[in-house]
């Protein structure tokens, strides 16, 4: 298992919140560091993230990491997230902070934070619904929208496609303000298409979408994605196909011919 595995409860994956790129990266690193702690983290435990850790994870200079962590500290305490919790009777609209305490150490270039009590179970008690992925998958993404879109998509990794997501729901999950990219062509070009292009270029999935309309108005999207075949795997498959193509089938038994036919069908 990867040491840099990020695990989030699906309530957080599907939550709506507005974090900039540095703040998202700090949260992700904090989740990774929290999982490295031997005991289950509580609302009293301090998690420390250094500029060196940040630089190594996201391929930035130490100075850039120093500035990113300092920037993230300035606003993260006031950031909120929200989600809907479905109950047997009705639903709860939940809003909470990410952290209950955060501090920046100027000399050590480190951030110390304590997760808010309400968020701790969604990071540590993951026996039920959760989404996991390697931090390296989003390390090269430079758009806050691309990071969030990747998380939303990877929660559907067992299906390879999503249900229809309304524009309002998608905008909320991506953290757009009411006045941002309100025209559909701007939303698609500046947020959706730009994020998908970055995801397809820099991660191990290829993502596409289909838009849905009511009349002439776009009302939502469905997304489909697949994992890229690594070059080594593709080369092995091509080599195996070539080898079987050169076999004289007349010298084989019926069972051996069936096996080769099945292999070629899936190649």
Image: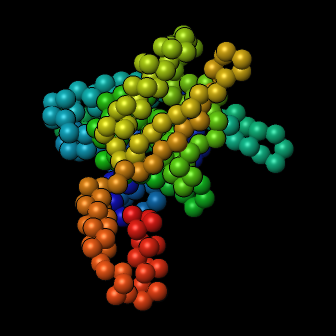
Q: Quadrant of the N terminus?
A: bottom left
**Residue 80 seen in this snapshot:** no
* Looking at the image, residue 14 lies above or below residue 5: above
In the picture, residue 27 is in which quadrant?
top left
Q: Which residue is painted at 82% across and 39% down in the image?
A: 90
In the picture, residue 15 is in which quadrant?
top right
Across and down, in percent, residue 140 comes to 28, 38
Total numbered labels: 0
The front one of 74 and 130 is 130
Across and down, in percent, residue 249 comes to 36, 81
The front one of 133 and 11 is 133
**Residue 61 seen in this snapshot:** yes
The front one of 259 and 140 is 259
Residue farthest right in this picture: 89
Q: Which residue is painted at 46% across and 53% down in the image?
A: 132
Residue farthest front in this picture: 250
Here the colouring is: rainbow
Q: Quadrant of the C terminus?
A: bottom left
Q: Which residue is painted at 51% across and 28% down in the image?
A: 174
* Looking at the image, residue 172 lies above or below residue 113: above
Across and down, in percent, residue 251 comes to 34, 87
The front one of 30 and 227 is 227
Across and down, in percent, residue 245 comes to 31, 71
Q: Which residue is painted at 20% across and 39% down in the image?
A: 59
């Amino acid at each position: 298992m990867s040491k840099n595995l990020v695990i989030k409860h699906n309530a957080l994956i599907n939550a709506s919140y507005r974090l900039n790129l540095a703040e998202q990266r700090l949260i992700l690193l904090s989740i990774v560091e929290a999982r490295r702690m031997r005991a289950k983290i509580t609302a009293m435990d301090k998690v420390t993230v250094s500029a060196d850790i940040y630089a190594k994870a996201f391929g930035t200079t130490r100075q850039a990491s120093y500035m990113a962590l300092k920037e993230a500290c300035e606003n993260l305490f006031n950031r909120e997230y929200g989600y809907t919790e479905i109950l047997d009777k009705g639903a709860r609209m939940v809003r909470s902070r990410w952290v209950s305490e955060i501090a920046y150490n100027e000399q050590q270039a480190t951030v110390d934070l304590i997760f808010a009590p309400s968020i701790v179970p969604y990071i540590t008690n993951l026996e039920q619904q959760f989404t996991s992925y390697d931090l390296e998958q989003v390390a090269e993404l430079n758009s806050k929208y691309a990071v969030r879109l990747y998380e939303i998509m990877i929660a559907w990794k067992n299906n390879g496609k999503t249900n229809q997501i309304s524009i309002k729901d998608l905008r909320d999950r991506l953290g757009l303000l009411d006045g941002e990219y309100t025209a559909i062509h701007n939303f698609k070009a500046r947020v959706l298409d730009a994020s998908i292009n970055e995801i397809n270029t820099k991660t191990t999935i290829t993502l596409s979408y289909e838009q849905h309309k009511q009349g002439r108005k776009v009302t939502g999207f469905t997304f489909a994605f697949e994992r890229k075949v690594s070059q080594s795997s593709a080369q092995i498959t091509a080599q195996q196909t070539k080898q079987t193509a050169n076999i004289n089938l007349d010298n084989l038994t019926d069972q051996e011919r069936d096996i080769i036919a099945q292999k070629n069908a899936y190649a």
